[in-house]
């Protein structure tokens, strides 16, 4: 592929992403009430997204990443995002130092 083809591919993907996001927003704002099944599906989206980000990293990486993810998950139950990130980073660094990973 040449540079121009890649540029067109990026622009098409950006347009498709924008259109689906705007289309979904417009569709939902025009509804007076959400059907219960749609509301349940929308409520499940954050957990589904977190799982798709978390699971591959947990199962394909080493113990340092697993410990970091577990530490971050536990800390996130009580503290905000920046503290959670620091806890995950610290757990990964500690595991790498202690176990030579």
Image (cartoon, rainbow, N blue to C red):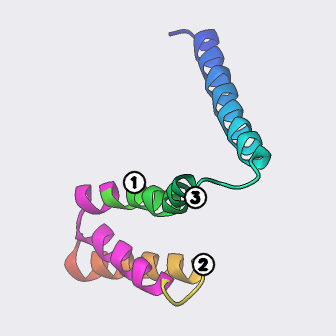
2 vs 32, left or right, is left
Assign a secondary structure to mark 2.
Answer: helix
Q: Which residue is mark 2?
A: 82
Distance (Cα) linking label 3 and label 2: 30 Å
The foreground one among 47 and 40 is 40
Count of numbered labels shown in the rendering? 3
63 in relation to 3, above or below:
below
Query: What crowding class fits label 1: few (fewer than 14 Cα within 10 Å), some (14-19), or many (20 or more)?
Result: few
Label ID, residue 61:
none
Q: Which residue is mark 1?
A: 52
Instruction: Provide the residue span drawn in magenta.
Output: 56-76
Name the spot of residue 3 as percent of width and height, x first. 60, 13
- Please state which of the two labelled residues, at mark 1 or mark 2, is closer to the viewer: 1
**Looking at the magenta stretch, what is its main secondary structure?**
helix
| Residue ID at (48%, 61%) | 44
13 in relation to 81, above or below:
above
| Among the two numbered marks 3 and 2 on one chain, the one whose residue lies closer to the N terminus | 3
Assign a secondary structure to mark 1.
Answer: helix
Label ID, residue 39:
3
């Amino acid at each position: 592929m040449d540079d121009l083809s890649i540029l067109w591919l990026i622009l098409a993907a950006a347009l498709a992403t924008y259109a689906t996001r705007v289309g979904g927003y417009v569709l939902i704002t025009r509804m007076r009430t959400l059907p219960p099944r749609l509301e349940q599906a929308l409520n499940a989206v954050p957990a589904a997204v977190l799982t798709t980000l978390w699971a591959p990293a947990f199962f394909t990486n080493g113990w340092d990443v697993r410990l970091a993810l577990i530490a971050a998950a536990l800390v996130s139950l009580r503290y905000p995002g920046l503290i959670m990130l620091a806890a995950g980073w610290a757990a990964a660094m500690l595991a790498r130092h202690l176990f030579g990973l």
